[in-house]
Image: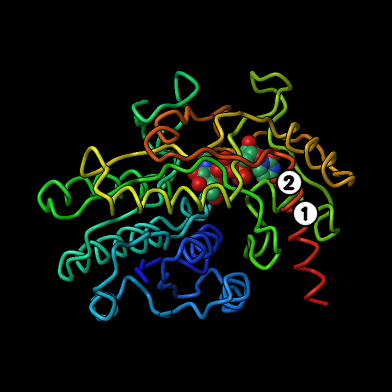
C-alpha cells in the first residue's frame, strides 16, 4: 500500500482525510503532537476504516524528530501538511506562537521531504489569503490582499515558501488547497470537530448552543450589504473537502499537474449568510437556534465564496453534500459527542 504522510492527521480536516485515503487504498501515516486533538480520534479513524493506522506523536517544529520520522517513512509518495494553529483571534494576541509553529513546521517538512526524496506536497491553505475580495466569486487568480491576522499571514507566507522551494527543487511538486469554510462531520459520528474551549467558528457554536452548553448564539453583524444583513461564507462539508485531498495527491502522483505549484479553491461555490445557515440547521434537525444579532466581529469580511471551476476541472472533483447535510451531520456529531461524555 502506498504511504501518505498526514501531518495534523488527528485534527478536524486531517482525520477525515486519513479516512478517505484509507478508503482509497492508501496507507496514511499520521503525525500529530495532540496539541489541539485527542488520541480518541485515532480510535474513530481505526473503527471507520477497520485498519490500524500508524500514528507518530511528535512536534514538527523539532527538525531532528521530523527528519527521523520522514527517514523511517521515506517510501511515502507524498505529504499532506495540515499541522498548524488556526485560531484567528489568538493569532492576533500571540503572533509569534503562530509564526514559530506554522512556519517552522512547514520548513522542517520541506527539508525532510527533500532529504528523503518524497516528491509530492499538499498544503492546507485558506480563503483568508484573499481578504475581502473586490469581485465575487473568488477565482484562484483573485489578487492576494494584505492578511488581516498573523494566522492568515502564515498561510500567505506558507504558499510563498513553497513557491520558492519548488522553484529550485524541481523534483518536488506541490498543491496549495484554499479552503473556504469546512463544517459537518463523518456520517458514522466517530470523528468530527473537537473545538477547544469556547468555539470561535459558527457551526460548533450553533450545535453547542442548541445542546444547551452555550446560552445563545451571537450573530456578528446584521447590517452587512447582503440579502439579510448577515455575512456570507462558502460552507463545505468536511468529507467533500477530504476527498479533494485524495484527488490532489493522485494528481501529483500521476504527474498530471501543469505547474510545480498549483492552487485550488475548495468550496461549493454557493454563499450562505449566517441566517441562512441557522435556517438550514433548523430545517434539517427540527431544533430551534436561540440567537441574537450583535455587533460585527472585528476582522470579519462581509462576503466571500468560491469559483470552483478550476478545482472541478483539474481535480475531477465537485462538492456533493448540501448545506442541510452539513448542518445535520454537525448536529448528529454534537449529540454523539455529548452522549459518550456522560
Ligand atoms: C475564519 C477565518 C478563516 C479560518 C477559519 C478557521 C477569517 C476572515 N477567516 O473563518 O481564515 O480558516 O476561521 O478557523 O478570519 N459567526 C457568528 N457567530 C459566531 C461565530 C461566527 O455570527 O459565534 C459568523 C462570523 O461572523 C462569520 C461566519 O459566522 O460571518 C463564519 O465564521 P467562522 O466560522 O468563525 O469562520 P470565518 O470567520 O469565516
Q: Counting other residues with Cα less than 10 Å from the Cα at mark 2, is it few (<14), some (14-19), or many (20 or more)?
A: many
Q: Closest to the observer: 300 or 36? A: 36
Q: Quadrant of residue 278?
A: top right
From the top left corner, tell me how far across and down residue 332 is, in percent. Answer: 78, 58
Please tell me whether mark 1 sits on a helix, a strand or a loop: helix
Pointer 1 local density, CA inside 10 Å: few below 14, some 14–19, many at least 20 = many
The answer to whether residue 130 of the structure is visible from this angle is yes
Q: Is mark 1 within 8 Å of ligand 1?
A: no
The CA distance from mark 2 to mark 1 is 6 Å
**Element marked by disc 2:** helix
Closer-to-camera residue (169/159): 169
In percent of the image, x 59 and y 73: which residue is there?
Answer: 41
Location of residue 48 (image quadrant): bottom right
Q: Residue at x 53, y 29 (%)?
A: 304
Horizontal and vertical percent position of residue 108: 25, 66
Task: Name the residue: 60% across, 78% down.
Answer: 43
Quarter of the image for the N terminus: give it.
bottom left
179 to 108, vertically: above or below: above
- Where is residue 58 shown, x and y percent of the image? 39, 79
Which numbered disc covers residue 45? none
Position of 179 relative to 35 (above/below): above
Q: Is residue 38 among the parts visible in the rendering? A: no
Is the residue marked 2 within 8 Å of ligand 1, measured from its CB? no
Q: Decide: marks 2, 1 in contact (CB < 8 A)?
A: yes
Q: Residue 236 falls in which quadrant of the image? A: top right
Q: Which residue is mark 2?
A: 327
**Is residue 333 found left or right of 68 in the rendered image?**
right
Q: Is residue 101 above or below residue 29?
A: above
Q: Which residue is mark 1?
A: 331
Amino acid at each position: 500500500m502506498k504511504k501518505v504522510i498526514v501531518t495534523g492527521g488527528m485534527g478536524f480536516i486531517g482525520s477525515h482525510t486519513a479516512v478517505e485515503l484509507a478508503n482509497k487504498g492508501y496507507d496514511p501515516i499520521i503525525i500529530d503532537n495532540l496539541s489541539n486533538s485527542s488520541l480518541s480520534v485515532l480510535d474513530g479513524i481505526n473503527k471507520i476504516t477497520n485498519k490500524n493506522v500508524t500514528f507518530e506523536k511528535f512536534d514538527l517544529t523539532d527538525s531532528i524528530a521530523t527528519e527521523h520520522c520522514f527517514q523511517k517513512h521515506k517510501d511515502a509518495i507524498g505529504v499532506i501538511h495540515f499541522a498548524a494553529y488556526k485560531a484567528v483571534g489568538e493569532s492576533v494576541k500571540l503572533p509569534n506562537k503562530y509564526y514559530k509553529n506554522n512556519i517552522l513546521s512547514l520548513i522542517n517538512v520541506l527539508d525532510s521531504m527533500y532529504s528523503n526524496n518524497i516528491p509530492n506536497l499538499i498544503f492546507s491553505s485558506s480563503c483568508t489569503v484573499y481578504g475581502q475580495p473586490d469581485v465575487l466569486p473568488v477565482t484562484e487568480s483573485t489578487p492576494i490582499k494584505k492578511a488581516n491576522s498573523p494566522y492568515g499571514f502564515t498561510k500567505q507566507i506558507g504558499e510563498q515558501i513553497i513557491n520558492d522551494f519548488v522553484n529550485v527543487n524541481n523534483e518536488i511538486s506541490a498543491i496549495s488547497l484554499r479552503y473556504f469554510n469546512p463544517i459537518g462531520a463523518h456520517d458514522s459520528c466517530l470523528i468530527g470537530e473537537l473545538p477547544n474551549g469556547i468555539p470561535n467558528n459558527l457551526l460548533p457554536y450553533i450545535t453547542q448552543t442548541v445542546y444547551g452548553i452555550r446560552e445563545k448564539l451571537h450573530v456578528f453583524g446584521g447590517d452587512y450589504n447582503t440579502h439579510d444583513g448577515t455575512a456570507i461564507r462558502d460552507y463545505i462539508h468536511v468529507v467533500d473537502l477530504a476527498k479533494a485531498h485524495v484527488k490532489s495527491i493522485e494528481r501529483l502522483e500521476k504527474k498530471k499537474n501543469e505547474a510545480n505549484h498549483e492552487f485550488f479553491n475548495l468550496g461549493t461555490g454557493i454563499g450562505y449568510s449566517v441566517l441562512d445557515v441557522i435556517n438550514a440547521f433548523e430545517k434539517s434537525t427540527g431544533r430551534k437556534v436561540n440567537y441574537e444579532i450583535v455587533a460585527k466581529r472585528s476582522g470579519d469580511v462581509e462576503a466571500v465564496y468560491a469559483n470552483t471551476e478550476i478545482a472541478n476541472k483539474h481535480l475531477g472533483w465537485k462538492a456533493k453534500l448540501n448545506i442541510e447535510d452539513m448542518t445535520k451531520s454537525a448536529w448528529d456529531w454534537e449529540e454523539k459527542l455529548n452522549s459518550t461524555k456522560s
